Each structure stands twice: as structure tokens, then as C-alpha cells.
Amino acid sequence: MAQFSQKIKRIGVFTSGGDAPGMNAAIRAVVRVGIAQNLEVYGIQNGYVGMMENKIYPLQLRDMANIIQRGGTILKTGRSAEFMKAEGRVKAAQNLKAAQIDALVCIGGDGSFRGAHALWEEHHIPVVGVPGTIDNDIFGSDKTIGFDTAVNTALEAIDRIRDTAASHDRLFIVEVMGRNSGFIASHVGLAGGAEEIFTPEGNTTVEKAVDRIKEAIGRGKTSSILVTAEGQKPGRAYDLADAIRKKSGMDAKVCILGHQQRGGSPTAADRILASRMGAAAVDSLLKGYCDIMIGTEGERLVQVPLDLVTKNEKKSQLDLLSLASILAT
């Protein structure tokens, strides 16, 4: 955890990486808490791209009206290959200093925090991170903004699919987002009563899944739902369906939920989490702390050095997979 001594009068806030429901609630908290503490708050549009293109503008209290319930991010977001280069960060730092931005709040994921850490290390611009990603894969925080909404969105879809599966005695494979993280898949699978869950961290194989489905059919079960994380690219569910067909002759229907998990109005849990984290980020800067992320341990907010966040991998909860397997028998 780093500390700085200069007094801050003007802070900037931006969202970066993939959008997540609840980002607007975090922006709202940063702006309104900042202004309540006599700070000027500026928005940076399109993340690091906007930082390099000088898309920096003041935000007022009324700009935050009616955004807490909106998905996405009013500041827009994006990824930047140019900012990954030292020259890009120099340009961004020059624009921030020209705009008299004393410190930053970065709302995003692992890649965003790497950029934030570099701004502090290379240009001594104080930054506090707020974890916003539906994947929930950020080391140092039990929860990330958007995860609860994504899980509930996927769960609603699975509940509907199960009605169809039961009506037609079918096997469905439902693919959820998460890339190399199985948090969404494991939580949705457990909550949705999935018969099998495929995650990057788990040890489920097609052979095991086929055996379990056959055992379930032997006990009188007529329909099954399998949940899989998308992996490196969307469409893994089709590969699984094809493998199951070749192994067993069973026909598996595929449903890829895709980006709808990122959109929509955030749940109450995500709105509250985002509000608390945004407020804590401003408070940390006012107390002279930076190069940290605001995370959670249980219900408690904690400060985690960005260096630790970006160098460590968050482990998935394999106990959820074991429990889901037992409960689905």
C-alpha cells in the first residue's frame, strides 16, 4: 500500500475493460461523495483511450440523477493496446496533469488495475481501484461489482430452460460467461440445480458427465441441465454437445447466454456493493492512500495493494462443484 502527501482538490473517475452492471452506481458514489468532501470530480470517457485522447470533463451532482438503476457505464469503456506501451501512458499522464487531476478512481478488472498501477509507478499519479467485472476473478476481493447481477440473469434463463427440458425430456447444455474463470458457472450451476458443471478449474469430463446422466436416467430422471463456462472463446457448449453425442448417442440442445449477462439493471446487492466501494475509494484518497484496490472480506471492505491484486490469481470455490454434484443426484 502506497501513501502520498499532496493535498487533492480534483479527482478523475473512469471505467475500463468489460462493462458490468453496477458500474454506474460506483461512478455515482465517487461523484457525490467527492463533491460532499469539497472535491471537484471529473469523468474520463472510454477508459484509458479517453485518457490519452483528453476526453476529460467535469461531473456535477445532477449528472448522477437516475443512473443507479442503469446497466453499462455512462462514462463508456474500452481496452487500449496503445496504453500498454510506455508512450501511451506518458500521453495519458500529460493530459491528466494538464487537466489538474490530482488522483484517480479506476473502476474495472485485472487489466485495468495493471494500467492503474503503472500510472502510479511511472508517473506518481495516485490511483485507487474498484473491482468491476461480472467474472468475479479479482484477487483480494470476495465479490466484484456485476457478479451478482450476472449470476441472477443466467439463473433466470436456466430456470426457463429447465421448464422446456422437463416438458420435452431433453438434455440442455447452457454456456455462461467467465472466460478462464468458473465463478459464474459454479454459482449458477449450484443455484440452478445443474446435473453437471464444467469449469476451467474443475475435473469434470465428458465421460463422467455421460455416466452421471445415464445413472440419473436409470433412477427415472427424464431431463438434465449441464452448465459450462465459455473458456477462451464462446461456443464451448457446442463442442461438449458434439462429444456427448459421440460418446452416448444422446442429443444435447445448446443455449449460449452470451452478453445478456453483462447488461440489464443491477441487483440491489450490486448497487449497494458499488456504492460502498465507490465511497471507500474517495475516502482512501482523502486519507492519502493509493495504489490499492477496495475489496471485500465477507461484508467488510478492505484495502489491497494493486501489486498483489495483479500478481495473484483468485482461486475458484471447488467446494461448490462438489456440493452441486451431491445435490443434483
Image (cartoon, helix red, strand yellow):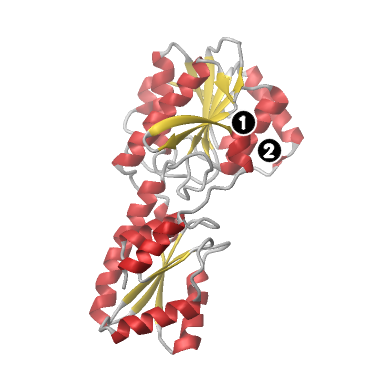
* 75 vs 210, nearest the viewer: 210
Q: Which residue is mark 1?
A: 51
Determine whether label 1 and label 2 are within 8 Å by CB: yes
Evaluate whether residue 255 shows in this view. Answer: yes
Q: Amino acid at mark 2?
A: Phe
Residue 191 x/y as whole percent:
31, 59
Residue 259 x/y as whole percent:
44, 56
Q: Which residue is mark 2?
A: 83
Report the mark closest to the observer, 1 or 2.
2
Q: Amino acid at mark 1?
A: Met
Residue 117 x/y as whole percent:
64, 32
Q: Is residue 285 left or right of residue 22?
A: right
Identify the image quadrant of the C terminus.
Answer: bottom left
Tell me what residue is drawn at x 39 percent, y 79 percent. 212
Tell me what residue is drawn at x 61 percent, y 32 percent. 116
Residue 274 x/y as whole percent:
39, 34
Name the outermost residue toward the right: 87
Identify the image quadrant of the N terminus.
Answer: top right
Mark 2 element type: helix
